[in-house]
Amino acid sequence: MFGVVVISIGLMAAILTVWHGTIVRIEMVAFGLLVLVWVLWAVDRILERSVERAKRETGQNREWRR
């Protein structure tokens, strides 16, 4: 899902860069960076949940006494 969004935005940015001027390029770079940050945040959350679920399933989530 994220790959489709990133590819479509990149394609749209490339087309607009060819057809229009600098302002559109700056806007598309800013928008692309915003989407990239969102995708990285979402992937990080997914990985965190996956690690938590794996710990719960294997029983490694308990605290060990020293």
Image (cartoon, helix red, strand yellow):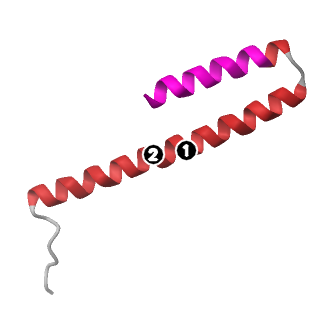
**Residue 6 forms part of the magenta stretch:** yes
Pointer 1 residue: 38
Left-right relation of 7 to 32: left
Q: What element carries label 1?
A: helix
Residue at 66 percent of width and 34 percent of height: 32
Name the side, left or right, on which 39 lies relative to 30.
left
Numbered mark located on residue 58 in the image: none
The amino acid on which the numbered mark 1 sits, given as a three-letter code, is Trp
Q: CB of mark 1 within 8 Å of CB of mark 2? A: yes
Name the residue at 82% across, 34% down.
26
- Number of residues whose C-alpha sits closer than 10 Å to that of mark 1, classed few (under 14), some (14–19) or many (20 or more): few
Task: Give the labeled residue for mark 2.
Answer: 42
Which SS does the magenta portion mostly show? helix
Q: Position of residue 38 (x, y in %)?
A: 55, 44
Is residue 15 located in the magenta-colored stretch of the structure?
Answer: yes
Vertical arrangement, residue 52 with respect to residue 5, above or below? below
- Image mark count: 2
